[in-house]
Image (cartoon, rainbow, N blue to C red):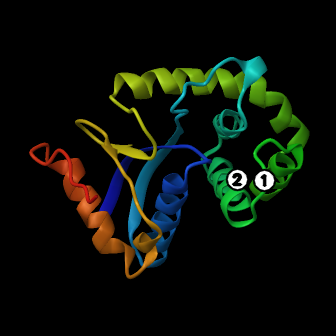
């Protein structure tokens, strides 16, 4: 199965982290992906002068244009935040992530409130126009699917879980599945 679409995410939510890990597991299990990762701040991006730590991380991600470096930065920021417990408000977190991504830390820090924030604002507008309201969400054609998980999502193989998400993305007759 080839899994395609646009993933709207943030770096703070446990659901975005769990989806990131689920997709990484599926890739290790031989699945192929054609996914665009677009940052989305559920509360809005605010101003460049008053970014929250989560918006700042999304602006850092948006500031890196080269796909492989952006992918490495995304993995580093997720890992530093969720596995290592680092703060998205700490400049050292961005410097460490930049080093992993092969990006100059000073250049990244300068780009965050400038090109990063502007790019995030544009992406935010497009995502809202596409119907994105929460993270993580995946959109293909039709309405986005908001994904809510528990830590149990990592038990067992990833492919069957992604097949359910894939079916939801493909079938506009299924609108919502949930458990209490």
Q: Position of residue 81 (x, y in %)?
A: 70, 56
Specify the label residue 77 is tagged with: 2
Q: Which one is in front, 51 or 170?
A: 51
Q: Position of residue 83 (x, y in %)?
A: 69, 66
Q: CA distance from mark 1 to mark 2?
A: 6 Å
Task: Tell me the residue at 55%/58% (across/down).
Answer: 17
Q: Are marks 1 and 2 in contact (CB under 8 Å)?
A: yes
Specify the label residue 97 is tagged with: 1
Task: Tell me the residue at 22%/36% (across/down).
Answer: 142
The quadrant in which residue 63 appears is: top right
Task: Tell me the residue at 90%/38% (across/down).
Answer: 106
**In the displayed structure, would residue 163 be above or below residue 5?**
below
Q: Position of residue 153 (x, y in %)?
A: 41, 70
In the image, 108: left or right of 151? right
Report how many numbered discs are placed on residues in the image. Answer: 2
Q: Residues within 10 Å of mark 1 (few under 14, many from 20)?
A: many
Q: Secondary structure at mark 2?
A: helix
Q: Which one is in front, 33 or 47?
A: 47
Extreme residue toward the left, this view: 173
**In the displayed structure, would residue 165 be above or below residue 58?**
below
Task: Tell me the residue at 70%/51% (across/down).
Answer: 73
Q: Quadrant of the C terminus?
A: bottom left
The quadrant in which residue 162 appears is: bottom left
């Amino acid at each position: 199965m080839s899994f395609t679409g646009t993933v709207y995410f943030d770096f703070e939510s446990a659901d975005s982290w769990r989806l990131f890990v689920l997709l990484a597991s599926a890739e290790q299990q031989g699945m192929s992906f054609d996914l665009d990762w677009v940052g989305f701040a559920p509360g809005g991006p605010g101003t460049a002068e008053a970014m929250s730590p989560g918006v700042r991380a999304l602006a850092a991600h948006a500031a890196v244009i080269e796909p492989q470096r952006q992918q490495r930065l995304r993995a580093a920021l997720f890992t530093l935040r969720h596995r290592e417990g680092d703060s998205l408000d700490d400049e050292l977190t961005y410097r460490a992530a930049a080093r992993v991504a092969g990006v100059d830390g000073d250049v990244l820090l300068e780009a965050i409130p400038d090109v990063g924030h502007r790019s995030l604002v544009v992406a935010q507008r497009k995502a809202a126009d596409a119907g994105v309201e929460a993270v993580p969400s995946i959109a293909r054609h039709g309405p986005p699917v908001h994904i809510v998980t528990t830590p149990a999502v990592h038990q067992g193989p990833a492919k069957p879980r992604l097949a359910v998400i894939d079916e939801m993305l493909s079938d506009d007759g299924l609108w919502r599945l949930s458990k209490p």
